[in-house]
Image (cartoon, rainbow, N blue to C red):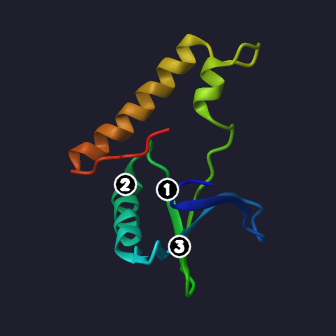
């Protein structure tokens, strides 16, 4: 659960593929947020060709929400894996590889005049 959305893991019944469903309310605090959601969809569509930005698969709309069906990123929070004090913690080379991928994704967004305000 984030500030503006709830993300739930979902499974496509006929293929057993895992996805992340992002449920976004169209109205927040009495304000219409539909255009912000449409902008996020447009950014995700622009980034479809980039390996380091989550892929958008489907969009559904109800009376109160828009649901973005996104690529599922398994494995939990990257930060937790980086700082864990156990055998499964990422090694420095793994962290370097992940940082390179994240920065390549952010660089792609910046080249397309998009700023990500919620990197985690």
Q: Which of marks 1 and 2 is nearer the N terminus?
A: 2
What residue sits right under mark 1 in the picture?
A: 55
| Residue at the image point whose x is 34% and y is 67% from the top | 39
Q: Distance between the residues labelled 1 and 2?
A: 8 Å
Which secondary structure lies at badge 1?
loop
Callout 2 environment at 10 Å: few (<14), some (14 to 19), or many (20+)?
Answer: some
Q: Pinpoint residue 115: horizontal percent, then vertical percent.
A: 29, 47
Work out whether residue 37 or residue 103 is closer to the camera in this orientation and state it: 37
Q: How far apart are marks 3 and 2 (CA)?
A: 23 Å
Q: Pinpoint residue 36: horizontal percent, then vertical percent.
A: 36, 68
Quadrant where the N terminus sits is: bottom right
Tag 1 near tag 3, CB within 8 Å: no
Q: Which of marks 1 and 3 is nearer the N terminus?
A: 3
Extreme residue toward the bottom, this view? 63
Q: Where on the picture, by quarter, is residue 61?
A: bottom right
What residue sits right under mark 2 in the picture?
A: 47
Is 39 located above or below residue 103 in the figure? below
Work out whether residue 8 or residue 2 is closer to the camera in this orientation and state it: 2
Is 68 located above or below residue 44 in the figure? below
What residue sits right under mark 3 in the picture?
A: 25
Which secondary structure lies at badge 3?
strand
Which disc is residue 22 wearing? none
């Amino acid at each position: 659960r984030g500030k503006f959305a709830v993300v739930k893991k979902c499974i496509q019944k006929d293929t057993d593929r895992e996805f992340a469903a992002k449920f976004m309310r169209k109205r927040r605090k009495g304000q219409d947020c539909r255009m912000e959601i449409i902008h996020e969809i447009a950014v995700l569509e622009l980034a479809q060709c980039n390996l380091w930005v989550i892929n958008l698969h489907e969009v559904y709309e109800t009376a109160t929400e828009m649901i973005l069906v996104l690529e599922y990123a398994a494995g939990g929070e990257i930060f937790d894996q980086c700082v864990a004090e156990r055998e499964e913690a990422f090694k420095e080379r793994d962290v370097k590889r992940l940082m390179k991928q994240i920065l390549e994704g952010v660089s792609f967004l910046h080249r397309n005049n998009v700023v990500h305000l919620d990197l985690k």
